Image (cartoon, rainbow, N blue to C red):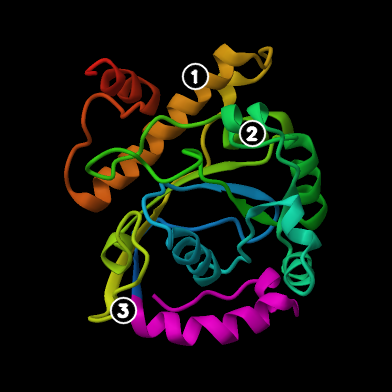
Amino acid sequence: MRSLSGPEKRKPSMFWVLASLTLPAWSLMVRYRFTPNSKLPKTGPFILAPNHFSEIDPIAMGAAVWHLGRVPRFLAKESLFKIPVFGWMLRKSGQIPVERAGAVMRSTGLDNPLSSASKLIESQGGVIVYPEGTLTRDPDLWPMRGKSGAVRLALESGIPLIPAAHWGTQELMPRYGKSIRPFPRKTIEVAIGDPMDMSEFRDRHIDQRLINEATTKLMNEITKLLEGLRGEKAPPERWDPSKHQQNETGRF
């Protein structure tokens, strides 16, 4: 697929520099195969929620978003923005600072969602949020139980929430791997779903029950996309790290 153009990509930014430095080498290692209906909104804010099973996923999905005509952004710890030079690059490339707050961050995957949403709306940009919060623990790399950050951000802001899935980065860098395997060239398959229908959650009080329902729906949508890419069905029960830890503890 040829890289798409768009008004956001045409606007001069730090990403011009980053893309020119990284994409030529990345393209030698990776080719993309997008499903036919994969697309992102041409303008306006969005939240992209993909699966996560390799440390190199952010680069893979960032490049995919760039190929689809938008500028990729991520949520980054606020402390990183204080690092000389690196912090300046984060700001200039539109990354979004998030102040992480212990238990709140661990339970949701995202602290202060309204602050993050206001930055997205102000910039009219998109952000990639991994709803699992970390690499999946599922032995076969299926999505595990999600955290509530992406859903909470969408519900409290009204920004479109778009499920996504990709497959193939594990060939470039295995889960928990420390080095990449660039040759032979790898194919990364990407599926971008339609914005999730949130109508059933509107006009309801945003409490933990609603958040859990919406998060389950999001993870189901991501899993369906991944099933299409892999050509197989996911296990009927989603991997739950807390239950697995309890089972492991019970063995001793």
Q: Quadrant of residue 19?
A: bottom right
The percent coordinates of residue 43 (x first, y second) are: 68, 59
Look at 19% across and 37% down and name the residue there. 233
Please tell me whether residue 116 is drawn above or below residue 198 in the rendered image.
below
Furthest toward the front, the residue is 252
Q: CA distance from mark 2 to mark 3?
A: 34 Å
Tag 1: amino acid: Glu
Question: Which SS class for mark 2?
Answer: helix
Element under disc 3: loop
Q: Which residue is mark 1?
A: 213
167, above or below 154, in the image: below
Disc nearest the viewer among 1 and 3: 3
Question: Are dots 1 and 2 in contact, CB under 8 Å?
Answer: no
- The quadrant of the picture occupied by the N terminus is bottom left
Q: Amino acid at mark 3?
A: Pro
Q: Residue at x 49, y 19 (%)?
A: 213
Tag 2: amino acid: Met
> Residue at point 64% right, 20% down?
202
Say few, some or many: other residues with alpha carbon within 10 Å of mark 3 (under 14 / 14 to 19 / 20 or more). some
Q: Which mark is residue 182?
A: 3
Residue underneath mark 2: 105
Q: Residues within 10 Å of mark 2 (few under 14, many from 20)?
A: some
The residue most toward the left is 232
Span colored in magenta: 1-30
Taking depth in this image into account, of 209 and 1 the one nearest to the observer is 209
